[in-house]
């Protein structure tokens, strides 16, 4: 898309912030002047380990690595902060996060589930006049760049006659994939920037994506035989990839689940500068003004 | 020089060994002094010091030393700190193994670096509050207690100073287990011998950590500061942590217990304060002494076994399939949310006859 078109659209959308402010939604004043900084991630071609579970010949197989082209997009430089999230809560548009009361430091919001992240994106879009959404797993990988981990597990030779070989190997690899030593929530920026200039990938906060968990059956030649999506479970990217039910705010280990879970759950958003997204948001905001909601 | 007295004693001892079960006999100091002595170095759980399952030779005096260590201990992966109290530095304290008729001689050391008096109550011992009345030591003191192992089984030991100090010291970590084996080893319900290739000692603890106004666990400078708040949480009887081997995840990951298909494992499980119900997910208890006392025949083929608060039990199991086994307190809320989960990693060949995934997960067929 030509840049002048985006600029025109963004300008138009930004202009819409003013009526909302005039309508008396006090927090929008703060946000309109303090919209999260974004970084442009240019179109990139990735070797991408596809999320989900794969069965080949009825035996669990390593994720296939596909070459994917991820179109350019803008993503938040930082994870969504606890302070911004608290504004959404006080606007009654988000449920309170499960993280214990924060100290007023500039920390990322944690203790949020997938639904919280989506609710925040919708509220933040209305409040800022820009359409925001969760990144897909591919976008998260492109943004994370050299810090992208994907699945932490190898495609080592498992034994088709002995499923325990894969279980034990995976268990040992998960045990070896140490979590960050310090579980305390850090101020944003603590883990530094990656080559894209984006902060804190691969720290102790894992990030929700919009990508659904799926189970794919592959034929002997690797062709997809069948695929079942389960959008009740979403992909999180971070120090290693994780799959979590959309309502979970805190990953826990124990019982039958023997994996190494993420330490904290948070998110960052993509600013969707597509004309369609802007048009959709403009319509939502017009409706809100018309109905006074 | 061979005195008349020694001759008589030797004859008496020989007669005693020949004619009477060891429990019926009461030896005097001279006789005990004449017994062979063995010094055993304790090891931290879940491991157990080397020992023979069938006693070699006659009764002996087995010497152990435990040094009490008061120290802060991290009990979960969020870094929550317990103002811990330990026998020999570990929670639970190390497991001791002797045989029926042996004498346990424990040197209990309370170094000057500690702040409180401590003692030890052996459920296996007879008299003096299990030894508690004879072992109270202040910081800077040590004491030596001897008791005769007259009953076989797995038995809890714990610190039991006075009044409210008793439960506080126990839920701060001061408990462990002693196993007294029959001289001829373990037996099934028919009296046939049972043996194990490995023994693991899983000590379960319930902890009660106070929270601040925001719901975060509080950290304290020292034991004294933590006492009043901790007592309030304890009196609510709702533990904040229920863990194996002193911390959430202490027997998982790199520290998971290891075995092979075909190996027989004895799992000794203690809980000094609160009831629990061990369960091996995907396995069983082939022979289980729920109450831990080997004079009673073991129960067979159990799915879950009950360990009464203040006791230790033992379960014998031969692994038949490889894989990752979770060993849990089958109050699953305690297992998953509060920490009572351990893992066994078992290597070996898969047995399709016992289990096979006949059809892998896939879309539901439409006709």
Image (cartoon, coloured by chain):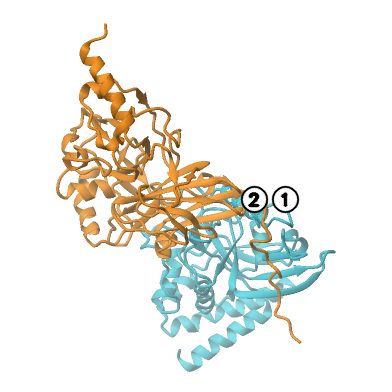
Chain colours: A cyan, B orange
**In the image, residue B160 lies at what x, y percent?**
21, 44
> Label 1, on which residue?
A156
Looking at the image, which residue is at 31% across and 40% down?
Answer: B86
Q: Quadrant of residue B52?
A: top left
Say whether residue A49 is visible: yes
Q: Which residue in the protein does label 2 denote? A: A169
* Viewer-closest of B189 and B131: B189
Residue visible at 52% across and 75% down in the picture: A115
From the viewer's perspective, tell me whether residue A66 is left or right of residue B243. Answer: right
Q: Residue furthest top?
A: B1
Measured in 3D between alpha carbons, the distance from the residue under mark 2 to the one under mark 1, in whole angstroms, is 8 Å
Q: Position of residue B311 (x, y in %)?
A: 31, 51
Q: Quadrant of residue B43?
A: top left
Q: For numbered disc 1, what is the local secondary structure?
A: loop
Please provide percent x and percent y for residue B151: 30, 42
Residue under the image location 53 percent in, 78 percent down: A122
Q: Residue furthest right?
A: A221
Q: Is residue B62 visible?
A: no
Q: Secondary structure at mark 2?
A: helix
The quadrant in which the N terminus of chain A is found is: bottom right
Q: Are circles 2 and 1 on residues that touch, CB within 8 Å? A: yes
Left or right of residue A187, residue B179 in this image? left
Number of marks in the rendered image: 2
Using the image as rendered, state which of residue B182 and residue A89 is in the foreground. B182
Task: Indicate which disc, 2 or 1, sits on the residue closer to the N terminus.
Answer: 1
Q: Which mark is residue B266?
A: none
Q: Do marks 2 and 1 share a chain?
A: yes
Q: Position of residue A212 (x, y in %)?
A: 63, 72
Q: In the depicted view, which residue is nearer to us: B16 or B160?
A: B16
Crowding at dot 1, Cα within 10 Å, few <14 / some 14-19 / many 20+, comes out as few
Identify whether A206 is placed above or below B193: below
């Amino acid at each position: 898309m030509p840049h002048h078109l985006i600029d025109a659209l963004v300008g138009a959308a930004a202009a819409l912030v003013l009526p909302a402010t005039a309508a008396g939604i006090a927090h929008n004043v703060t946000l309109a002047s303090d919209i999260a900084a974004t970084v442009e991630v240019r179109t990139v071609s990735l070797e991408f380990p596809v999320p989900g579970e794969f069965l080949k010949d009825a035996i669990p197989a390593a994720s296939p690595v596909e070459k994917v082209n991820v179109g350019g997009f803008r993503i938040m430089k930082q994870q969504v902060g606890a302070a911004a999230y608290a504004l959404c809560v006080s606007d009654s548009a988000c449920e309170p996060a499960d993280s214990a009361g924060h100290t007023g430091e500039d920390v990322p919001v944690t203790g949020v589930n997938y639904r919280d992240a989506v609710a925040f994106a919708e509220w933040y879009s209305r409040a800022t006049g820009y359409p925001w959404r969760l990144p897909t797993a591919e976008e998260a990988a492109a943004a994370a760049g050299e810090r992208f981990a994907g699945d932490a597990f190898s495609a080592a030779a498992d034994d088709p006659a002995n499923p325990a070989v894969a279980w034990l190997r995976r268990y040992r690899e998960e045990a070896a994939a140490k979590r960050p030593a310090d579980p305390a929530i850090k101020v944003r920026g603590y883990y530094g920037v990656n080559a894209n200039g984006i902060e804190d990938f691969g720290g102790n906060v894992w990030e929700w994506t919009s990508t659904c968990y799926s189970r794919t059956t592959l034929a002997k030649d690797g062709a997809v035989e069948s695929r079942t999506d389960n959008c009740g479970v979403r992909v999180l990217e971070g120090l290693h990839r994780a799959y979590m039910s959309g309502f979970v705010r805190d990953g826990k280990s124990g019982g039958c689940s023997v994996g190494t879970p993420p330490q904290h759950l948070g998110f960052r958003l993509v600013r969707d500068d597509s004309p369609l997204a802007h048009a959709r948001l403009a319509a939502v905001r017009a409706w809100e003004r018309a109905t006074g909601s | 020089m061979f005195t008349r007295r020694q001759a008589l004693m030797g004859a008496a001892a020989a007669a005693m060994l020949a004619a009477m079960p060891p429990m019926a006999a009461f030896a005097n100091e001279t006789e005990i002094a004449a017994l062979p002595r063995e010094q055993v170095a304790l090891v931290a759980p879940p491991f157990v010091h080397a020992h023979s399952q069938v006693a070699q030779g006659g009764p002996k005096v087995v010497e152990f030393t435990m040094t009490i260590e008061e120290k802060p201990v991290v009990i979960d992966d969020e870094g929550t700190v317990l103002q811990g109290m330990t026998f020999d530095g570990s929670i639970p304290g190390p497991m001791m193994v002797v045989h029926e008729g042996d004498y346990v001689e424990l040197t209990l050391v309370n170094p000057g670096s500690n702040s409180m008096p401590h003692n030890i109550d052996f459920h296996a011992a007879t008299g003096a509050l299990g030894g508690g009345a004879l072992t109270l030591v202040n910081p800077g003191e040590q004491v030596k207690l001897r008791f005769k192992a007259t009953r076989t089984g797995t038995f809890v030991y714990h610190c039991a100073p006075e009044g409210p100090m008793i439960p506080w010291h126990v839920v701060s970590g001061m408990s462990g287990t002693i196993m007294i084996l029959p001289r001829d080893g373990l037996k099934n319900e028919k009296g046939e011998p049972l043996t194990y290739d490995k023994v693991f000692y899983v000590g379960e603890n319930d902890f009660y950590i106070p929270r601040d106004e925001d719901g975060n666990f509080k950290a304290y400078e020292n034991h004294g500061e933590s006492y009043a708040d901790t007592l309030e949480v304890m009196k609510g009887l709702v533990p904040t942590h229920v863990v194996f081997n002193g911390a959430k995840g202490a027997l998982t990951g790199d520290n998971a217990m290891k075995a092979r298909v075909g190996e027989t494992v004895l799992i000794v499980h203690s809980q000094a304060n609160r009831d629990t119900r061990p369960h091996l997910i995907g396995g069983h208890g082939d022979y289980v002494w729920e109450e831990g006392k080997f004079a009673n025949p073991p129960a067979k083929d159990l799915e879950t076994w009950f360990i009464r608060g203040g006791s230790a039990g033992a379960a014998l199991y031969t692994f038949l399939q490889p894989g990752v086994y979770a060993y849990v307190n089958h109050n699953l809320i305690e297992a998953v949310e509060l920490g009572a989960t351990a893992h066994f990693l078992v290597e070996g060949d898969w047995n399709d006859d016992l289990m096979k995934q006949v059809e892998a997960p896939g879309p539901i067929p439409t006709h």
